[in-house]
Each structure stands twice: as structure tokens, then as C-alpha cells.
Amino acid sequence: MFEYALRKSYEEMIAVIRIAEEDLNNEELKKEVNFRVVNFLHCLFDYYERLEKNEEILIDCNDKQFFSGLRYANNKLKHDPSVLKVYQRTEAFHFQSSFR
């Protein structure tokens, strides 16, 4: 079940990101992307913690470091209000050009 939830949450996250790429200023899509990313991270950590507790599975040291860093980044995003929202567009620069 954990593996199914992980796969499903990943697929949903990728699908909404692809939709949001076509409508970058849609506030509801921004919220949906945030929701899907957070949901995927929760599923990922649930699955990883299940693997960590299984004594029959040996987790590589590099994988442990990777998940430790990812866990830190996830906690920082959730609990530190000074972290900026990287998806928020504040202004754009446009210019016309033609190549002849």
C-alpha cells in the first residue's frame, strides 16, 4: 500500500506541475502544486521510514544522507517563514525582437 500511495502521489504531482507550467499566474494551480508536492513528500518519507525500520533492508549511506538532506529541506519549507516561495512570480521583463 505504501508503494502504491507513493507512486500515485508522484503521478498526481507531475500531472499538476505540467498543467501549471501552461498557466503560471493561476493562484489556484499554485496552491494545487504546493499541495501535491507536500503530499508526495509525506508519502515518500512514510515509505522511507518503513524501509528504515525493516532490519532486512540495508540502506546505503549515500541514500541515508540524501534523505536526511531532503528531510531537512522539507522541514525548513514547512516551519521557517523566512523561506521564500520559489514559484511566486513578482514581475516579468518583456521585449520585442526580430531576427532577419
Image (cartoon, rainbow, N blue to C red):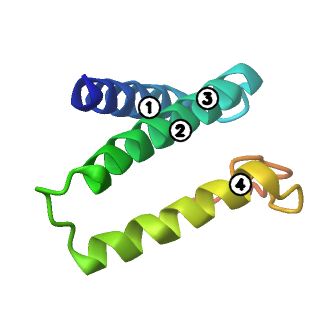
Instruction: Estimate the spatial distance between the alpha carbons at disc 4 and disc 2, rounded to whole Å.
Output: 11 Å
N-terminal-most mark, 3 or 4: 3
Q: Amino acid at mark 3?
A: Phe
Q: Amino acid at mark 2?
A: Val
Marks 2 and 3: in contact by CB < 8 Å?
yes
Q: Amino acid at mark 4?
A: Leu
Up the image or down, 64 lies above or below 90; here it is below
> Which of the labelled discs sits on residue 47, or is there none?
none
Residue that badge 2 annotates: 37
Instruction: Estimate the spatial distance between the alpha carbons at disc 4 and disc 1, rounded to whole Å.
Output: 17 Å
Name which residue lies at 65% across and 35% down.
Answer: 24
Instruction: Estimate the spatial distance between the alpha carbons at disc 3 and disc 2, rounded to whole Å.
Output: 6 Å
Name which residue lies at 15% across and 66% down.
Answer: 58
Residue that badge 4 annotates: 77
Provide residue 96's location: percent of width, then percent of height: 69, 55
Marks 4 and 3: in contact by CB < 8 Å?
no
Front residue of this view, candidates 82 and 46: 46
Residue 96 in view here: no
Name which residue lies at 44% across and 31% down.
Answer: 13
Q: Amino acid at mark 1?
A: Met
Marks 3 and 1: in contact by CB < 8 Å?
no
Helix, strand or loop under label 1: helix
Dot 1 alpha-carbon crowd within 10 angstroms: few under 14, some 14 to 19, many 20 or more = many
Residue 12 in view here: yes
Instruction: Estimate the spatial distance between the alpha carbons at disc 1 and disc 3, rounded to whole Å.
Output: 9 Å
Residue that badge 1 annotates: 13
Residue that badge 3 annotates: 35
Instruction: Estimate the spatial distance between the alpha carbons at disc 2 and disc 1, rounded to whole Å.
Output: 6 Å
Helix, strand or loop under label 4: helix
